[in-house]
Amino acid sequence: MSVSSATGPAPAITASGLSKSYGDKVVLDGIDLRIPQGTVFAMLGPNGAGKTTTVQILSTLIPADSGEARVAGHDVARDPDAVRAAIGVTGQFSAVDNLLTAEENLILMADLHHLGRREGRRRAAALLRRFDLAEVAAKTVTTFSGGMRRKLDLAMTLVGDPRVIFLDEPTTGLDPRSRRIMWEIIQGLVADDGVTIFLTTQYLDEADQLADRVALLDHGKLIAEGTPEELKRRIPGSHIRLRFPDAGGLESAAALFGSATRDSEALTLHIPGDGSISDLRAVLDVLDDASIEAEALTVHTPDLDDVFLTLTGHPQPKENAR
């Protein structure tokens, strides 16, 4: 299946029929990708679905068994050096050197990118300021918190000025505040620098917050794709929840909505809907016309957790089993 339409910005990443197996185990089963420049693309899936394998192939770390892929305009198999020059990769585990200072880690990366001494120090200083690490530039990484280490790890990825960045579960193990800081940094990379982000994550709220488009990978196949809102609309379960002050109000309201379900103990009524403003307005108009007042109202809509649990984790059909 295709991820994204053929219109819009030129693609930063494309793939066609990308497959990978280890012995009899099929890890990727012919996936197609088309990811526009300057966007955040999130790939979600259960453990073992093939997310990290996809990142490894696209970042030239391992070869695909079949299929083609291009990153930043370069063929992954035929021109891996050009791909590597255009990308940055931040893995699940921090790649910083604990025995070096923050500044030394960045200068080491500058040396690996063959930057001159002056340019390397200039870029290191700029990244330390950008990631709020200037005050700890001379401290060894062993003294850093998890959030600081992840910020430094991402800063090191940016030394080479990549146009495409692969973030493989970048906020694993971070506390909520550090995760939010990382989100802001990622959003800034896209908004300010026009960088393309390929994100894998186990945190569904992270994908919901950051991604322009989301794809679900399961058993090596892409099974769903769209914006977070498009995917959530595919899942039933939206409803309006009304709570009433007494049983009489509940009974009167229940008589007006034939498809509603009631909870007599909680004095609540659940009315199916699509979660839209027009749907909510229609329910309130019915209550107003009948002079019935609810004590509280909440709108419940499926989130990406519901999408993930509904669409993934099902057994493979026998004909597809390897």
Image: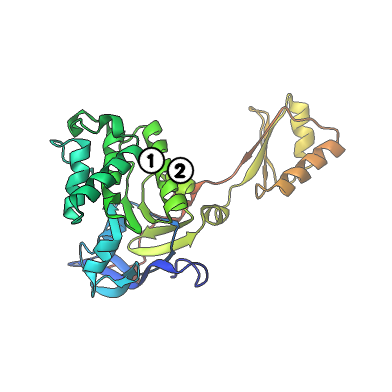
Tell me what residue is drawn at x 32 percent, y 47 percent: 169
| Colour setting | rainbow
Eye-nearest disc, 2 or 1: 1
Q: Is residue 92 above or below residue 197?
A: above
Give the residue number, with chain letter if any, for mark 2: 205
User: Farthest front residue?
Assistant: 118
Residue 256 lies left or right of residue 110; in this view the side is: right
* Residue type, numbered disc 2: Asp
In primary-sequence order, the first of circles 2 and 1 is: 1
Which image quarter: residue 10? bottom left
The quarter of the picture where the C terminus appears is: bottom left
In the rendered structure, which amino acid carries the disc numbered 1? Met
Name above or below for residue 85 compared with residue 183: below
Farthest top residue in view? 245
Drawn side of residue 110 relative to residue 1, left or right: left
Locate residue 231, reporting x and y percent: 52, 56
Residue 10's place in the image compared with 272, above or below, is below
What residue is shown at x 78% (from left), y 39% (from top)?
A: 284
Vertical comparison of 133 with 212: above or below? above
Question: Do tag 2 and tag 1 residues touch (Cβ < 8 Å)?
Answer: no
Residue at (43, 56) in percent of width and height: 194
Instruction: Say which residue appears at 38% left-offset and 59% top-offset.
Output: 217
- The circle on residue 182 is 1
